[in-house]
């Protein structure tokens, strides 16, 4: 199936949607919006993965499998353990392919705001002190910088692999294209879905 852009109509009604992108690209925001627009279930993968003190939850895989049984859903395409499970059932993959400077600005602002507000994230976790960006090689800011190109590599692997023929893959570069897709193809897909149940 050809790679779709922000103005291309979706070839089928999206019922199992993944949103791919590096940290700070807006995966969770868009996946949640897609779920609301299309009437799908949504769960944030981070909430299933992170236990107290940022430790991985042992129930993560079981919880992902339980979520997938809902049949119609949207979520983020992340975590090496979850990606194959999610991809096996997905019918649509939205790739947020933003420039590196855009995602770095977003993730820096988000991290700083969360830290200053002591905002609780998942299972009691909060952002670590900002100075740890210099001491922790896995700090989110450093991770976002290092991992930026990996999403594209993964998506291209999907397009070239066995899922490429059945999966609708939408590439969105920059917020303008995200907004164009939301107000165009996504909205029309939702309208078609509403008409089909009348």
Image: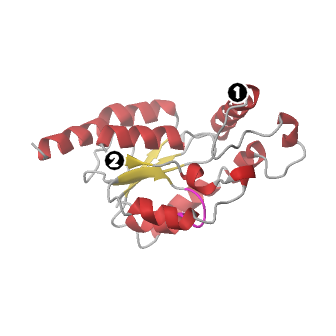
Q: Nearer the viewer, residue 129 or 184?
A: 129
**Residue 191's quadrant in the figure?**
top left
Q: Position of residue 72 (x, y in %)?
A: 32, 55
As displayed, is residue 176 above or below residue 45?
A: above
Residue 81 part of the magenta segment: yes
Residue that badge 2 annotates: 40
Q: Position of residue 119 (x, y in %)?
A: 68, 32
As displayed, is residue 32 above or below residue 91?
A: above
Q: Secondary structure at mark 1?
A: helix
Quadrant (top left/top right/bottom left/bottom right) for the N terminus: bottom left
Residue 80 part of the magenta segment: yes
Would residue 97 be visible to someone looking at this image? yes
- Please tell me the numbered disc located at residue 189: none
In the displayed structure image, the side of residue 39 where residue 170 appears, left or right: right
- Please tell me the numbered disc located at residue 113: 1
Q: Residue at x 72, y 39 (%)?
A: 126
As displayed, is residue 183 above or below residue 55?
A: above
Q: Residue at x 70, y 46 (%)?
A: 144
Q: Residue at x 55, y 39 (%)?
A: 26
**Residue 79's quadrant in the figure?**
bottom right
Q: Main secondary structure of the magenta part?
A: loop
Sequence-first disc among 1 and 2: 2
């Amino acid at each position: 199936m050809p790679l779709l852009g922000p103005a291309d109509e979706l070839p089928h009604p999206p019922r199992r949607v993944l949103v791919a992108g590096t940290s700070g690209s807006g995966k969770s925001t868009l996946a949640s919006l897609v779920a609301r627009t299309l009437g799908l279930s949504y769960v944030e993968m981070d909430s299933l993965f992170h236990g107290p003190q940022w430790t991985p939850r042992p129930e993560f895989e079981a919880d992902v499998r339980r979520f997938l049984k809902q049949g119609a859903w949207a979520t983020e395409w992340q975590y090496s353990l979850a990606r194959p499970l999610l991809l096996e059932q997905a019918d649509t993959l939205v790739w947020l392919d933003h420039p590196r400077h855009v995602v770095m600005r977003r993730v820096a602002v988000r991290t700083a705001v969360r830290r200053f507000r002591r905002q609780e994230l998942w299972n009691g976790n909060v952002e670590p002190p900002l100075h740890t960006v210099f001491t922790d090689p896995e700090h989110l800011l450093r991770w976002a910088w290092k991992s930026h190109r990996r999403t594209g590599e993964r998506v291209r692997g999907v397009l070239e692999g066995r899922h490429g023929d059945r999966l609708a893959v939408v590439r969105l570069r920059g917020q303008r294209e995200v907004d164009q897709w939301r107000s165009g193809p996504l909205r029309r897909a939702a309208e078609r879905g509403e008409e089909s149940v009348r």
